Amino acid sequence: MNYRHGDLFYKQVDSLKGEQIFEGKRFTLAEGEATGHHHIITAPKVIITDDNGQRYMALSSKGTLAHPEHGAVVIEPGIYIEIREREHDYFLNETRRVVD
């Protein structure tokens, strides 16, 4: 399963990589730079790892990804890699993360 939630995309993968940075029930995945709203995952058990700046998320059971502007999405148990949407500014000739 794959999930898009605003500027975040979660693609299911086979295994976690990197070092664990969080284990608990609620984690802020991204903070809204423009609006101040946050993308928050809530589940009975959430594990977040970081592999040289690439983040992974593991859910042992269903979780809810919520954001006031994007609504809530139910995510099935599994392991996911986080992919942040990027955009290219042709005037500045640079690629950057999308500001939410």
Image: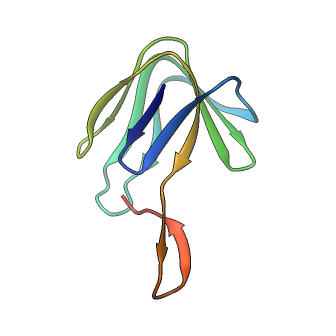
Q: Is residue 93 left or right of residue 72?
A: right
Locate residue 94, reporting x and y percent: 55, 79
Q: As displayed, is residue 50 above or below residue 22? A: below
Q: Is residue 82 left or right of residue 63?
A: right
Q: Residue at x 50, y 15 (%)?
A: 77
Locate residue 29, reporting x and y percent: 48, 41
Q: As displayed, is residue 24 above or below residue 50? A: above
Counting the numbered discs, the total is 0
Locate residue 34, reporting x and y percent: 33, 63
Locate residue 54, reporting x and y percent: 67, 46
Q: Residue at x 43, y 34 (%)?
A: 3
Q: Residue at x 75, y 48 (%)?
A: 52
Q: Residue at x 50, y 87 (%)?
A: 92
Q: Tell me the quarter of the image containing the C terminus.
A: bottom left
Q: Is residue 84 left or right of residue 15?
A: left
Q: As displayed, is residue 49 above or below residue 77? A: below
